[in-house]
Image (cartoon, helix red, strand yellow):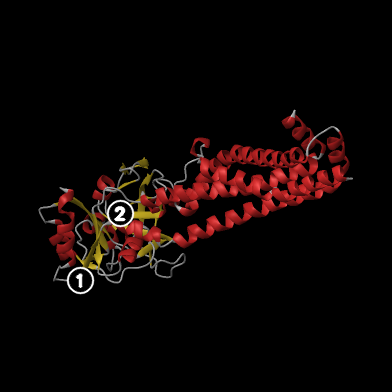
Amino acid sequence: MFFRLAWRSQLSRKGSVLLSVLAIAVSVFVLLGIEHIRQQAKTSFGNTVSGVDLIVGARTGDINLLLYSIFRLGNPTNNISWDSYQTVINKPSVAWAIPISLGDSHRGFRVMGTSTDYFKHFKYGQKRPLRMAVGQAFSSAYDVVLGADVAQQLGYQTGTQITLSHGLGGTSFSEHKDKPFTIVGILARTGTPVDKTVHVSLQGLEAVHQPGQLSAAQAGQLTPKTITAFMLGLKAKIGVFQLQRQINNYRAEPLLAILPGVSLKQLWNMMALMENTLRLVSGLILVASLLGLSAMLLASIRERTQEINIMRMLGAPPHFIFLLIQVEALFITAAAIALAVLLLPLASYLASSWMGSQFGLNIASWNPSQIEPLPLLAIFASAALISLAPAGAAYARARAFKSA
């Protein structure tokens, strides 16, 4: 009887109720969506590189080394000599090494010179290896392997020839047109900066900076003088701190070795202000919509004076009418949450591929099983609290009728 009366009351004012449901649904959608993106971004961020024990570069800040070696952002303070690289990787504790050489670009995408060990040992996510969507890894000095986003955005296929440009600009006046590269492979999408990288061999990258024409065989014999950074995998994890200390105290030139997991966490913590700002904005949107609900109910009390009087004549006590308004507010809130929960999986599914291509974030589709009860209870409690004003006004009108 009580809930049926509340339901029929909602139907009698379906226009204003529908607007309130939509306003609260949007705010709940934003609140849950932001929290989902935040958690997924944090997971994707931490999964950018996996299985790498140390990243070594010229002495600089930990975050700067991480940014240019993994995220291809910024520039190194200096390069590392090839001799120092050979000295470190020949230490008994080192199992494998991936050299990295940066500095050139292709139509705005960064070019990374490396070795075939990159395709064997580099992992992302939960130690997921790189996989070719088309073709194979480079085997010749003038072969190139593209990340998924590079191939998709530029419309490239295997067999296409491209040229590299000096520097990082989208338009360069120093293009190495005399030494074209042939696309031999395209990597499967990873949701990491790998997707936006053009991969060539160290020998090929060295060849484009040599004067005159060089055949692929001649270019394959070149040895780089310097590289930008390198990644290390150790035979035993227990020796990682010892090797890190040895590298940081290396006397031939100033080097820095960082633990990628630790540096990734530091970088994420630096963005805590942005996280809290997003939460604050979504919370304020929710409060604004709940205040709108309260205003709607309060305005309806003046229109429902006759309804309240009839209920009083039928014997309904003032607290019954007070609870009726409260239940109506909770009905509207529950309908809004249900609508938001229905729309969020579809929206996250449609947005996941776009966020992966635009921001390199691997965002999984939202699942209703991910709902945490505490935020929903907080929303219901807030709705009950906000509706105290219209419920109190209805209670006052009911008592006034009795005294009259």
Q: Secondary structure at mark 1?
A: loop
Q: Residue furthest front?
A: 403
Q: CA distance from mark 1 to mark 2?
A: 22 Å
Q: Is 90 rendered above or below residue 338?
A: below
- Observer-nearest residue: 312 or 86? 312
Identify which residue is drawn at 72% across, 46% down. 20
- Observer-nearest residue: 82 or 173? 82
Quadrant position of the C terminus in the picture: top right
Identify which residue is drawn at 55% across, 39% down. 345
Which residue type does callout 1 highlight?
Answer: Pro
Q: Position of residue 312 (x, y in %)?
A: 84, 37
Q: Residues within 10 Å of mark 1 (few under 14, many from 20)?
A: some
Circle on res. 169: none
Locate residue 7: give its quadrant: top right
Q: Is 292 rendered above or below residue 106?
A: above
Q: Position of residue 301 (x, y in %)?
A: 81, 46
User: For mark 1, what is the residue?
Assistant: 254
Is residue 177 visible in the rendered structure shown here?
no
Judged left or right of residue 157, residue 215 is: left
Q: Position of residue 328 (x, y in %)?
A: 72, 39
Is residue 318 visible in the rendered structure shown here?
yes
Quadrant position of the N terminus in the picture: top right
Question: Do residues under tags 1 and 2 come within 8 Å of each other at their CB atoms?
Answer: no
Q: Secondary structure at mark 2?
A: helix
User: For mark 2, what is the residue?
Assistant: 261
Q: Is 267 rendered above or below residue 32?
A: below
Tally of numbered discs: 2
Identify which residue is drawn at 85% across, 39% down. 307
Which residue type does callout 2 highlight?
Answer: Gly
Q: Position of residue 162 (x, y in %)?
A: 40, 56
